[in-house]
């Protein structure tokens, strides 16, 4: 047994967190309209769009399938946004199950928003980044929701996940 945390385990953690937020937002739709300001998102709904849209775009890049243009990512409703996450995790699971996938292969992003030294990474690092990106933003979202007076009950720490036993 390895003591390292696997990408499969991080994906489980991500799926649990995403399911939690979908449920909370379904039960409290007014949260979607809260002002946000994180990452340029004017409200929580657009922040969720960013989180799950980024997951999908990272997964598509790694899978070598056409990347959904940012302006084609739906703005809502919540079910359409969660579908982005579902599509992303499906692609991620397929990649993780493929024994021929080269996780050490380099991938170079042709984007201006990354400094040149950060544009080339391994597939492994990119998938880890995508999964941690979501978790980092879920922690920000939990703080925003609590500050707005909602009790989220978010237990997003890895310690509370079923991943890792």
Image: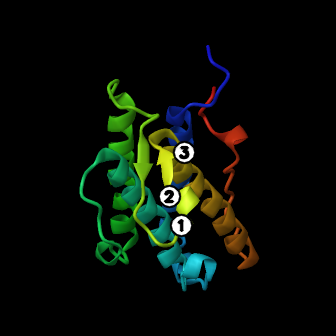
Along the polypeptide, which appears first: circle 3 or circle 2?
A: 2
Give the crowd class for mark 3: few <14, some 14-19, many >=20 residues within 10 Å.
some
Describe the element under mark 1 as helix, strand or loop: loop
Residue ID at (33%, 67%): 80
Residue 89 higher or lower than 165, as above or below: below
- Residue 99, quarter of the rendered image: top left
Residue ID at (49%, 52%): 120
Describe the element under mark 2 as helix, strand or loop: loop
Q: Which residue is labeled 3 in the image?
A: 128
Label 1 to label 2, Cα distance in Å? 6 Å
Are the residues at dot 1 and dot 2 in contact (C-beta closer than 8 Å)? yes
Are the residues at dot 3 and dot 2 in contact (C-beta closer than 8 Å)? no
- Report how many numbered discs are placed on residues in the image: 3
Label 3 to label 1, Cα distance in Å? 17 Å
Note whether residue 61 is visible.
Answer: yes
Q: Which residue is labeled 1 in the image?
A: 114
Q: Percent x, y for residue 137?
A: 61, 63
Give the crowd class for mark 2: few <14, some 14-19, many >=20 residues within 10 Å.
some
Along the polypeptide, which appears first: circle 3 or circle 1?
A: 1
Q: Which residue is labeled 2 in the image?
A: 119
Tell me how the rendering is colored.
rainbow
Give the crowd class for mark 1: few <14, some 14-19, many >=20 residues within 10 Å.
few
Residue ID at (42%, 59%): 109
Q: Percent x, y for residue 73?
A: 33, 72
Describe the element under mark 3 as helix, strand or loop: helix
Label 3 to label 2, Cα distance in Å? 15 Å
Q: Percent x, y for residue 161?
A: 63, 39
Front label number (3 vs 2): 2
């Amino acid at each position: 047994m390895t003591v390292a945390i696997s990408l499969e385990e991080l994906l489980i953690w991500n799926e649990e967190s995403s399911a939690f937020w979908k449920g909370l937002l379904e039960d409290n739709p007014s949260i979607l309209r809260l002002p946000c300001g994180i990452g340029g998102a004017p409200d929580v709904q657009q922040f969720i769009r960013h989180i799950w849209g980024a997951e999908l775009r990272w997964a598509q890049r790694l899978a070598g399938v056409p990347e959904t243009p940012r302006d084609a990512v739906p703005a809502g409703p919540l079910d359409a946004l969660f579908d982005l996450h579902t599509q992303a995790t499906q692609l991620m699971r397929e990649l993780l199950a493929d024994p021929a996938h080269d996780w050490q292969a380099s991938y170079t992003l042709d984007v201006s928003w990354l400094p040149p030294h950060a544009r080339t990474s391994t597939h492994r690092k990119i998938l880890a980044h995508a999964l941690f990106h979501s978790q980092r933003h879920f922690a920000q979202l939990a703080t925003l929701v609590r500050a707005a007076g909602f009790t989220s009950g978010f237990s997003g720490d890895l310690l509370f996940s079923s991943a890792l036993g």
